[in-house]
Amino acid sequence: MRAVTITMNAFGPYRDKQTVDFTTLGNESIFLITGPTGAGKTTIFDAMCFALYGRASGSDRDQDTLRSHFASPEEPTYVDYLFELRGRTYRVKRLPKQQKKKERGEGFKEEPARAELYQVIDEEEQLLASKIKEVNDTIEELMGLDYEQFRKMIMIPQGEFRKLISENSKEREEILQRIFKTEFFAELTSHFKAEAKKLEEEMKQFEWRIEQEKEKIHWHPDHEEEEQSQELSKVRERLHQRIMEQEIGCNEKQEKLQELKKEVESFQENVYQKQRVTELFQEKEHLLSEQQQLTDLQPEINRLQQEKQRAVKAAEIRPYEKDYENRRAELEKWQTSLQQKEERRTSLLQEYQEAEEKYRAEEQNAAHRETLKNEWKKKQEEEKRLQEYLLLGEELQKHNKQIVKHQEAVATNKQQQKETAQTVDKLKESVKEDPSLAEKEYALKQKLENVGHKKQRLQQLNREWEQLKKLRKTYQSFMARFEAVKKEQQVSKEAYESALEEIRSHHAYTLSLNLVADTPCPVCGSSHHPQPAQKPAAVKSSDEIQRLKEAFTQKDQQLTQLQEEFVQVKSEGETQRQLTDHLFQELQDDMEDRSEASIQKAVETASEHLDRIKKDLHTLGEKRARIQQESRQLEELEGKMIQLRREAERLQEALQSSRHQASDVQANIHAMEKDGSFKTTDAEALKSEAVKQEALYLEAEQNWEKAQTLYQQKRDEWQQIQTSVEEGQSYVEEMKAAVEERRNLVNQTLDQFSFPSLEAYRQALKSSAELESIEKRIQDHDKRKGIVDERLRVLNQELEGSEKPNMDALHKLLEEKKEARDASQEQLNEIQVMLKQNKDVEKNMAQLVEDMGALAADYYDVAELAQLAAGDNPMRLSLERYVLASFLDEILVQANIRLDQMTDHRYQLIRSGSIAKRGAQSGLDLEVIDHHTGQQRSVRTLSGGEGFKTSLSLALGMADVVQSHAGGVQLDTLFIDEGFGTLDEISLEQAIGCLRTLQDGNRMLGIISHVSQLKEEIPAKLQVHSGPRGSSLQFVFQ
């Protein structure tokens, strides 16, 4: 990040708007911020921190104290910060929470905090975020740093970094935790501790479950307390013995139970047979009783048979009686109907005579009805003429309204033509297309194609580079395997050659046994034998020699094959390297060096460049689309102008037509007024008279029609009833004769079947259901009597010579035998339940012991890991402190480079290796080595100037390390707040020399100080002036 400008308004001691333009520094990368104490020097960095993160730089400043006390209530407090980051420009504006005067009334209202973040592209700002959280998240993502890391890296505040060398190990740990975000390791330590606690609880749970299983064991009652108190292994051993004892007892109980079951079954079979004899005796007694009851019912059965015979005879008479009753009922019906018709005939005759008189009277009123009709027609004609007159008046008003409407439409049309013409003129000016747009678009497309091709080549280079790395790893792995096989081949070769040498030695020894002094040697021919071959220690067999030869041959072939593969691997690697070198050569202008990071950076740069070109193309396309849209709009408006002109002509024609029509209607109205065809212009009165005349006429017509209808109706009804009465009288006489004939036939039938009277016949008459019931009772009695007699005969045969047994005594004896069997069964069940439960306990305990053993192994490992991570170790060093110590070591390496320069090679910072007392955590204490004395001592013993140089070195080292761990963030701005006043002239020169080395990295360095020598050494100064109306600032150059 490199600051460009920062603007403060009503911020801190600055009442008026103040802008610091860092671009005026030019090539001066170090500048001094000077001014009176309290004037607002540190406020500049406060404003920068507040703009980015919404918080001030120092730990003793908060957001609520940022508003200037010099500012008027109407003046808002805000900071506007413009900065560059990785080749892009951003602007952030932030306003703190503040009081604002109410627009209406008196008093103030609270304005909430606001923030806006823009990206500046070609002097145009694009909004990236407008909510405080969104701005904070986006800033942190862009910077790659949070607030704590930023203020530790960008600025060395007053006294802040002194804490790193003066505070104890615990407080230094908190500072490093905030900077390097090592909460994860503390959480990991807590996780280990919680996991160990969890496993410990699970171990206790297993122990509890084992105790619960021990409680379930069924021991022998005489030894229960003794067995229960033994240790777990003894308990499991005794439990197994107890199970074996229970199994033996269970087998004995089962044998005894089987004997009792057989005894019960045998006796029960005897009881069942005796029970059968008893049941037969009971059945015989019951059947004898039923036989007597059937004999007592025989007289009743005889009566029912006689009653059935009489009912059958009566059933044959019933059809004749029913025919007689039907005929008599029909006669009575016709007689009643005839009487009603005669009464109706008398009544209709009187009504017919009255209707005829009324008809004759209405017939004579025909002339009166005609007069009423003519009067009604006359009133209708007069009303029609008046209605035509009134309609003409309404039509005239309608035409007049239409005329006004057409006049207004003509005026509107003229205004629309005027406005449309103005719009057309503006669009004609706007759509004059820039002739260079097509050229720009073509150039951008060509550029897009070139950059896209370059990105593809860079991506190909990235892939080829990865492939080259893989081939190099393959080559290294292959070479390791090649060297191993080569070594194995050499060993097998030496073994084989050694075996051959042993064989040759054996042959020489054999020959030496036959050597004789002064006799020539058969090998060399010499007669002197000063060193005959000695007996070898051991000689291998031919099979062993063959195996050694085969082993050597196999390794030698394997080595030959690897040499061939080596040529292939080397060839592939060389080809890949040449391809990668070619791509590097082709793309060397786009990369800093031949490294993976440079490739990635080039790909990212090409992607960003590609995105910018696409964005420019999109903007250019939008511009051309706007011009095309306006051209289409212009065509539409020109067409609309033609339509408006045509519409104007049509409206003029319609206006003239409406005026002619109104004139014609007015002439017709004058003609009707002169005609005098209606006496009044009161339409309602005239209509009322016409309605009244119509009612009189219609009433007379309705009376005439009613009289005609009634007369015709009554005449027809009297003629119909007269005919019906005559026909009814004739049919009644015929029915009387038929009824008498049916009655005589019924009497003859009664005499035939010996019924003395009609009453006796009706008493004997039965329904079919009653006859079926009587027949069923007779049949059931006879059938049951036969069954009972036959069954008694069979029982007498079966029970002949038998006596009725005493079942109560037999059942009592059977129950005693069953009780003995059930008692034995219960004892067996109890033993089986205890045996099963003991076996389950044995199985469960074995599983629990096995699971507990596996869990215990995990628990011991995790518990030990938790203790180590928590710092419960000889070094008193927790996991998080170990990581922080690693970061601190990196910081010290960078810090000592500067401290060595500023202290003329005297001091060197180191991390103390001593262990803290009384169980305190160690690992982060600092000491210095004084090379003048060769002694180590605490950093608290340093003087003020030495402490400042140490703090400054530590701060610069911190910035370098945090920057390297923050994802490659590049920071080009640094501020140092005071501390130089504690240095002597030599130390000051050393410190300034150290700071000038920061310019080599193109950093901009601001120093806040009152030291005069710094004012002389640094030409660029940002002077802060303090006054009664607030502070102001400006750049001054020597």
Image (tube, rainbow, N blue to C red):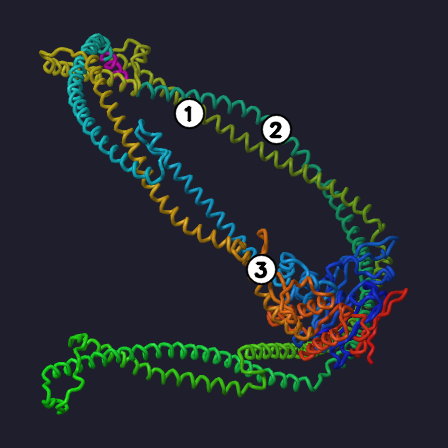
- Is residue 637 visible in the rendered structure shown here? no
Q: Between residues 911 and 674, which one lies in front from this camera angle?
A: 911
Numbered circle sitting on residue 353: 2
Task: Determine the main secondary structure of the stretch shown in magenta.
Answer: helix
Residue that carries the numbered disc 1 in the rendered image = 731
User: How far apart in space, not on screen, are marks 1 and 2 (Cα)?
Assistant: 30 Å
Q: Earlier in the sequence, mark 1 or mark 3?
A: 1
- Is residue 185 visible in the rendered structure shown here? yes
Q: Which image quarter: residue 360?
A: top right
Mark 1 residue type: Tyr
Q: Earlier in the sequence, mark 3 or mark 2?
A: 2
In the image, residue 186 sits, relative to residue 571, either above or below, namely above
Q: Residue furthest right?
A: 1028
How crowded pointer 2 is (Cα within 10 Å; few <14, some 14-19, many 20+) is rated as few
3 or 2: mark nearer the eye: 3
**Which residue appears at 21% of the width and 78% of the height?**
499
Q: Which image quarter: residue 592?
A: bottom right
- Extent of the magenta region: 305-317
Residue that carries the numbered disc 3 in the rendered image = 914
